[in-house]
């Protein structure tokens, strides 16, 4: 009897201990300062308990728990994973200047992870990609993974068929009529797409039909309205509440065609023809508005309208800050040509100073919009999206926003606008376990936004390898790609460096061509063909031709000939490459070379009138 009683007591004690111990969790992040993105406040000494990819429980930091893996938060700041509501995989993958590859496969998903996750961006919305990519990228959207960002696509950016737009970008979707627009929305819905991007080249009849149909399918609609085709108030009237880019407020209050020349004249700006000129001109427009009270009044009225309608607008401020030399690193809306600073060779010292003033005025207006109740969300729109996300947080603070406001903008605001806040944007039981743990607290010093971070994606603690691409690009900048290739052969896959994919080698080759490291670029192309025999579809005849003509324009005839010859070796059945080669030889005073290459286009295309005319001119 004695032993029976002791046994029962022992079982009761064991049961009591087990009850005290409670369930075992997969991961615990203990004793952190938790940022509550809904209420914009920090709750100290919290422990987050995670099972699989979901937040299972949040408890006081002093409570007991058991977990397979424990991260000691040490009272550091824990925030939800950042949400970027305007990225372009196409920008990240532009392996050639202004040209996109025709298709992607699963290997290209790596670019998203490399670009976004190390900076804490766990969710991103792609605002326009080639439609040929959709079969692959929709599978990424549907099949989330701890190793890749949550990725939402919007198909191609919708535009109307316009007589003056002869060569629409590959990531634009052309609709010829309202009926076609309706059909396209239905096609997207059937493929599982839930976001829609309307671009400024979409006219009101098509826009109206598309919006009406999109609402039937519960699409999240975003619009980049610009260049006075459709204004923000007109788009709001049609039912749009998410707008892209703060700078797009400017063309909604003035007619760019009417004010372009007066603005340029007022500031003595040269007429450039590149993406950097676009960025700087846009900034100067805000200085122009500041000097014209009637325009500023219209701008403030637009802010009031956005706030009253509970509309949202994305930022894209890093690219403008970089143009004005206000950021720690340079990036643009286009990464070609390879450069570390804005390309404004005709700007005077005084104009560069005015450029910084114009940027500050734009940011003052952004702060005013925020204070009036306009809901901001992060949308970086650059190939370096993750790094630019952190830069934008710094820029927002320097514009006068508080840390808690900035963190809400970077997390919950984007998730709410895209109607995914039931999954992301806040740290709460039942939400996805996507969180970022700062080493140093931005509340202590805003520059700590750039500090080291521990990124947990879907409950998995991530680690990151160094980028081979960045290392090889550095060798290009040092004019020593040959040394870089030797380094790659010895180090790839070792010493924390990743292994490059075919598209990354090709991107580096284009960079090298533009930097006139011609033989090295050709060697790298050949190396890529050996390593990835099926990658030739990534080469772009038009992109190589464009580089050749840039050399020809700069009177670098030998370099132009080299590029055109290389292009001909890749595309021997294209009459156009030989036509270009003939032009380069003629400009280099080599009539024999010109005759030889102008004959080739006629063999491939007897109707080539230019070749006939040039042969006649050279012969005479």
Image (cartoon, grey):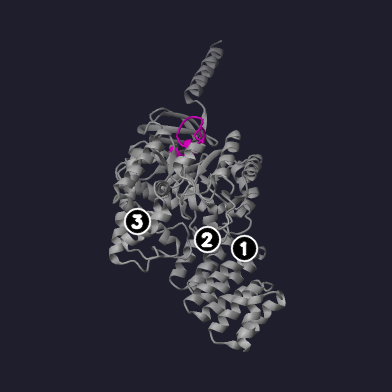
Q: Does residue 76 appear in the picture of this structure?
A: no
Residue numbers of the magenta segment:
413-435
* CA distance separating discs 1 and 2: 27 Å
* CA distance separating discs 1 and 3: 38 Å
Q: Earlier in the sequence, mark 2 or mark 3?
A: 3
Badge 1: few (under 14), some or many (20 or more) residues near its Cα, within 10 Å?
A: some
> Where 376 falls versus 289 (above or below)?
above
The percent coordinates of residue 258 (x first, y second) are 40, 55
- Disc assigned to residue 494: 2
Disc 2 + disc 3, Cβ < 8 Å: no
| Magenta-colored segment: predominant secondary structure | loop
The percent coordinates of residue 529 (x first, y second) are 63, 68
Q: Which residue is mark 1?
A: 538
Front tag of 1 and 3 = 3
Disc 1 + disc 3, Cβ < 8 Å: no
Magenta stretch contains residue 425: yes
């Amino acid at each position: 009897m004695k032993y029976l009683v002791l046994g029962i007591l022992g079982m009761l004690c064991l049961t009591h201990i087990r009850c005290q111990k409670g369930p075992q969790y997969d991961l615990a992040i203990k004793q952190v300062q938790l940022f509550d993105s809904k209420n914009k406040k920090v709750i100290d000494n919290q422990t987050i308990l995670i099972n699989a990819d979901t937040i299972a429980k949040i408890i006081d930091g002093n409570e007991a728990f058991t977990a397979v893996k424990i991260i000691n938060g040490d009272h550091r700041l824990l925030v939800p994973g950042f949400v970027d509501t305007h990225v372009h995989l196409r920008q990240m993958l532009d392996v050639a200047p202004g040209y996109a590859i025709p298709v992607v496969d699963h290997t290209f998903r790596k670019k998203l992870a490399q670009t976004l996750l190390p900076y804490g961006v766990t969710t991103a919305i792609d605002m326009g990609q080639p439609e040929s990519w959709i079969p692959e990228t929709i599978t990424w959207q549907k099949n989330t993974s701890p190793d890749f960002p949550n990725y939402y696509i919007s198909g191609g950016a919708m535009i109307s068929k316009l007589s003056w737009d002869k060569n629409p970008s590959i990531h634009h979707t052309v609709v010829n009529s309202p009926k076609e627009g309706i059909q396209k929305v239905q096609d997207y819905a059937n493929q599982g797409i839930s976001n829609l991007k309307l671009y400024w080249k979409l006219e009101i009849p098509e826009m109206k039909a598309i919006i009406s149909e999109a609402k039937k399918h519960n699409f999240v609609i975003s619009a980049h309205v610009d260049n006075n085709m459709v204004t923000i108030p007109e788009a709001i009237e049609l039912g749009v509440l998410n707008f892209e880019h703060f700078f797009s407020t400017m063309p909604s209050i003035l007619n760019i065609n009417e004010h372009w020349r007066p603005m340029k004249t007022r500031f003595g700006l040269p007429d450039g023809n590149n993406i950097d000129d676009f960025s700087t001109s846009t900034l100067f427009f805000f200085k122009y508005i500041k000097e014209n009270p009637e325009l500023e009044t219209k701008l403030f009225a637009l802010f009031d309208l956005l706030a009253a309608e509970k509309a949202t607008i994305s930022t894209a401020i890093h690219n403008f800050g970089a143009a004005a030399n206000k950021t720690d690193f340079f990036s643009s809306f286009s990464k070609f040509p390879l450069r570390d600073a804005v390309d404004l060779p005709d700007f005077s010292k005084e104009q560069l100073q005015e450029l910084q003033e114009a940027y500050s005025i734009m940011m003052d207006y952004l702060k005013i919009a925020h204070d009036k109740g306009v809901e901001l969300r992060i949308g970086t729109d650059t190939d370096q999206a993750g790094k630019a996300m952190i830069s934008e947080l710094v820029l927002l603070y320097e514009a006068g926003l508080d840390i808690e406001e900035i963190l809400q903008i970077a997390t919950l605001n984007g998730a709410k606008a895209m109607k995914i806040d039931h999954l992301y944007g806040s740290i709460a039981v039942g939400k996805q376990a996507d969180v970022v743990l700062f080493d140093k607290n931005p509340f202590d010093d805003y520059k700590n936004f750039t500090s080291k971070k521990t990124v947990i994606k879907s409950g998995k603690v991530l680690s990151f390898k160094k980028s081979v691409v960045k290392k090889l690009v550095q060798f290009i900048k040092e004019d020593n790609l040959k040394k870089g290739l030797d380094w790659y052969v010895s180090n790839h896959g070792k010493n924390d460096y990743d292994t490059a994919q075919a598209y990354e080698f090709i991107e580096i080759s284009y960079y090298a061509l533009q930097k006139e490291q011609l033989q090295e670029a050709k060697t790298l192309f050949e190396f890529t063909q050996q390593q990835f025999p099926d990658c030739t579809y990534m080469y772009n005849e038009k992109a190589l031709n464009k580089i050749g003509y840039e050399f020809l324009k700069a009177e670098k005839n030998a370099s132009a000939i080299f590029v055109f010859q290389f292009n001909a070796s890749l595309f021997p059945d294209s009459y156009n490459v030989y036509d270009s080669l003939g032009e380069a030889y003629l400009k280099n005073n080599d009539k024999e070379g010109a005759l030889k290459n102008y004959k080739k286009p006629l063999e491939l295309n007897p109707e080539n009138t230019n070749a006939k005319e040039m042969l006649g001119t050279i012969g005479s």
